[in-house]
Image (cartoon, rainbow, N blue to C red):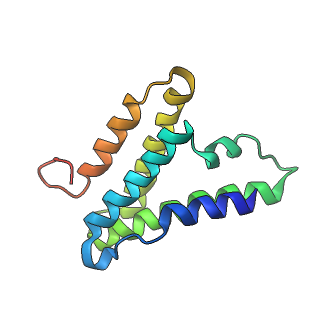
């Protein structure tokens, strides 16, 4: 399981634009990749696995924790480059909204909550509240 999560994360983060040069492009690409993965798979592999880990599977639990921490930290790093206030908190909330939208994909086949979460994510850092 750790290898699957590491590969998934690497695929998500590979070749993002340098946030120091264009944080908005990096943010758009990252949010787009997350959404595309959820749409294609109907879920997040990390969240799916998170519900199966227990104290009896510490390696799996650590792999899931590391997966989400690294993804959140990558998101926060992009937001920090854009001087977004409270980047870790914003990244945490954004990731929770995106992940939460998979509930509706899984139970109802409804992509609309994911689309709304993506729209909200893309508005971060835009003073006018428009998608980046």
- Identity of the residue drawn at 42% across and 30% down: 111
- Identity of the residue drawn at 56% across and 40% down: 41
Q: Is residue 83 above or below residue 42?
A: below
Q: Is residue 11 above or below residue 96?
A: below
Q: Is residue 4 above or below residue 35?
A: below
Position of 17 compared to 49: left or right?
left
Q: Residue furthest right?
A: 56
Q: Nearer the viewer, residue 34 or 70?
A: 34
- Identity of the residue drawn at 50% across and 24% down: 109
Where is residue 112? Give x, y as percent.
37, 29
Task: State the image quarter where residue 49 is shown.
Answer: top right
Q: Nearer the viewer, residue 90 or 115?
A: 115
Where is residue 113? Give x, y as percent.
39, 31
Position of 23 compared to 36: left or right?
left
Q: Quadrant of the N terminus?
A: bottom right
Q: Residue furthest top?
A: 108
Task: State the image quarter where residue 70 is shown.
Answer: bottom right
Where is residue 50? Give x, y as percent.
69, 46
Where is residue 56? Give x, y as percent.
88, 50
Task: State the image quarter where residue 30 is shown.
Answer: bottom left
Q: Quadrant of the C terminus?
A: bottom left
Residue 66 visible (yes or no)? no
């Amino acid at each position: 399981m750790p290898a699957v999560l590491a590969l998934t994360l690497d695929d998500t983060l590979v070749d993002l634009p340098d946030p120091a040069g264009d944080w908005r492009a990096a943010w758009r690409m990252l949010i787009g990749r997350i959404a595309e993965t959820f749409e294609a798979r109907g879920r997040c592999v990390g969240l799916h696995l998170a519900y199966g880990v227990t104290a009896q599977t510490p390696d799996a639990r650590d792999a899931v924790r590391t997966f989400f921490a690294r993804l959140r930290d990558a998101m926060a790093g992009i937001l920090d480059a854009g001087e977004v206030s409270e980047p870790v908190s914003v990244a945490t909330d954004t990731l929770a909204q995106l992940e939460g939208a998979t509930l509706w994909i899984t139970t109802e086949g409804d992509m609309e909550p994911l689309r709304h979460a993506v729209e909200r994510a893309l508005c971060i850092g835009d003073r006018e509240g428009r998608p980046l």
